Image (cartoon, helix red, strand yellow):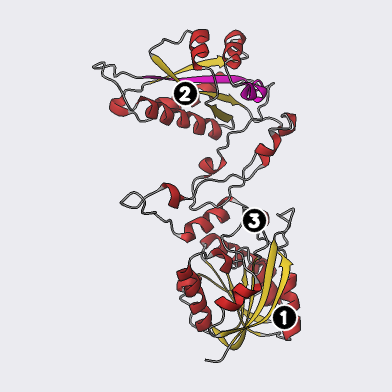
């Protein structure tokens, strides 16, 4: 299943991160009645207006009641039937639109039914089951086939079962199962006080989320050992020692490689988990480093450095204020004549995934015009074992000018 979430903005419990509407179900494995009862019990305890619990569920179990399961399946949209036919259980969610205590319309009935159904789905995930909610069905026919009263509103049909083999799906569905999961950013859907004023989560929360839920070897920016572009630049500059700073150290591989080459290395990252990963790697490799949780846009570091490495941080800042804060930090922390080795996405890289900013050499010259000298800019790639097709990159050697 597609478990890799792209552009996550804050840590969440693994249960929420793993929830995925798969189309691949094991057709030969029934859902135990005890497991099904647990899912329905989770729904029963969902919140609702006045505690009304306006939801009803109809369970169509292929192993226990094949006739009604086939009736429910036949009402699904043809494309849904292609994969839902493998699900052992179909759950029809129905909302009752009048309060039982006074008969008045319950305008929250659909909302509350949705709350109950997601509780059911999360409990299923916790039990090792898979779910897929559907809106593609013929409601009128479904009412007729399953004897649902006319006053009820059919809200959804949820396929439930154990995960199956993706390879067994029709070819049209297989890319959907492996695609990275994306969502609108919080800034587009959350408003701060007034409609239209975007609420922005702290950047650190998103980085922490990626490190918490994905092993470092599977992160797109993981690179075992020193990046070849950095290695070439160090050989070219004949710089073999001194104080080095690895900003956005991530998994720590660049940090450790520098330390092994004789540099006195300080590593920083905005993510606590990334810093912990770097410290663990340093201990395993028996090298001495200094590592801090630090934000390059508001850095607490004070000692100047002979060398600064940036392998994928600058291109994350799409606002001018953040870019200027980054540059101010470099002016303060990089010694005169010190080198910045900068690797970022190239403007010719057109993939939708990845950082918000991509650059040409002319962009770097313009942005680093105050206090820096661009020595070299080379077109290259971000190579990583986690990426089948390495994205295009721009590698720059930049010298800090004397004040």
Where in the figure is residue 261, as x and y percent of width and height?
71, 79
Relative to 48, say whether 374 is above or below: below
Along the polypeptide, which appears first: circle 2 or circle 1?
2
305 or 370, nearer to the observer: 370
Say whether residue 255 is visible. Answer: no
Per the rendering, the mark at residue 234 is 1
Along the polypeptide, which appears first: circle 3 or circle 1?
3
* Magenta stretch contains residue 12: no
The stretch of residues the image draws in magenta is 78-96
Where in the figure is residue 105, as x and y percent of width and height?
29, 20
Q: Which residue is mark 3?
A: 219
Q: Is residue 75 left or right of residue 166?
A: left
Relative to 306, say whether 315 is above or below: above
Query: What residue is shown at x 72% (from left), y 80% (from top)?
Result: 234
Query: What residue is shown at x 53% (from left), y 45% (from top)?
Result: 183
Q: Which residue is mark 2?
A: 40
| Disc 2 element | helix
CA separation, marks 3 and 1?
Answer: 25 Å
Residue mark closest to the camera, 2 vs 1: 1
Report crowding for label 2: few under 14, some 14 to 19, many 20 or more residues within 10 A (C-alpha): some
Say whether residue 143 is visible. Answer: yes
Quarter holding residue 367: bottom right
| Disc 3 element | loop
* Magenta stretch contains residue 84: yes
């Amino acid at each position: 299943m597609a478990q890799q979430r792209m552009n996550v903005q804050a840590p969440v419990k693994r249960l929420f991160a793993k929830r995925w509407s798969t189309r691949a179900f094991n057709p030969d494995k029934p859902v135990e009645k005890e497991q099904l009862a647990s899912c329905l019990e989770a729904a029963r305890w969902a919140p609702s207006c006045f505690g009304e619990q306006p939801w009803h569920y109809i369970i169509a179990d292929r192993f226990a009641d094949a006739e009604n399961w086939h009736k429910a399946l036949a009402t699904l949209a043809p494309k849904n039937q292609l994969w839902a036919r493998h699900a052992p259980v179909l759950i029809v969610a129905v909302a009752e639109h009048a309060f039982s205590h006074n008969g008045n319309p319950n305008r929250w009935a659909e909302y509350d039914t949705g709350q109950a159904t997601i509780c059911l789905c999360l409990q299923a995930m916790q039990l090792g089951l898979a779910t897929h909610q559907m809106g593609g069905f013929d409601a009128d026919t479904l009412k007729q086939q399953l004897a649902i009263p006319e006053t009820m509103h059919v809200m959804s049909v949820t396929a439930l079962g154990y995960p199956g083999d993706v390879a067994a799906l029709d070819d049209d569905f297989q890319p959907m199962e492996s695609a990275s999961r994306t969502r609108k950013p919080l800034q587009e859907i959350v408003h701060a006080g007034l409609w239209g004023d975007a609420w922005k989560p702290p950047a650190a929360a998103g980085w922490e989320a990626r490190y918490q839920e994905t092993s470092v070897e599977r992160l797109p920016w993981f690179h075992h050992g020193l990046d070849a572009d950095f290695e070439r630049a160090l050989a070219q500059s004949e710089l073999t020692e001194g104080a080095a700073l690895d900003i956005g150290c991530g998994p720590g591989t660049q940090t450790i490689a520098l330390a092994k080459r004789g540099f006195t290395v300080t590593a920083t990252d905005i993510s606590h988990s990334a810093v912990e990963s770097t410290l663990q790697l340093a201990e395993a490799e028996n090298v001495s480093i200094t590592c801090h949780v630090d934000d390059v846009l508001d850095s607490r570091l004070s000692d100047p450095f002979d060398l600064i490495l940036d392998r994928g941080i600058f291109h994350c800042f799409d606002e001018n204020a953040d870019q200027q804060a980054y540059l101010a930090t470099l002016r303060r922390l990089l010694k005169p004549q010190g080198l910045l080795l900068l690797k970022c996405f190239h403007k010719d890289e057109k993939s939708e995934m990845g950082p918000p900013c991509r650059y040409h050499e002319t962009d770097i010259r313009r942005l680093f015009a105050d206090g820096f000298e661009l020595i070299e800019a080379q077109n290259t790639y971000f190579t990583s074992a986690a990426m089948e097709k390495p994205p295009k990159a721009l590698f720059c050697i930049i010298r800090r000018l004397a004040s």
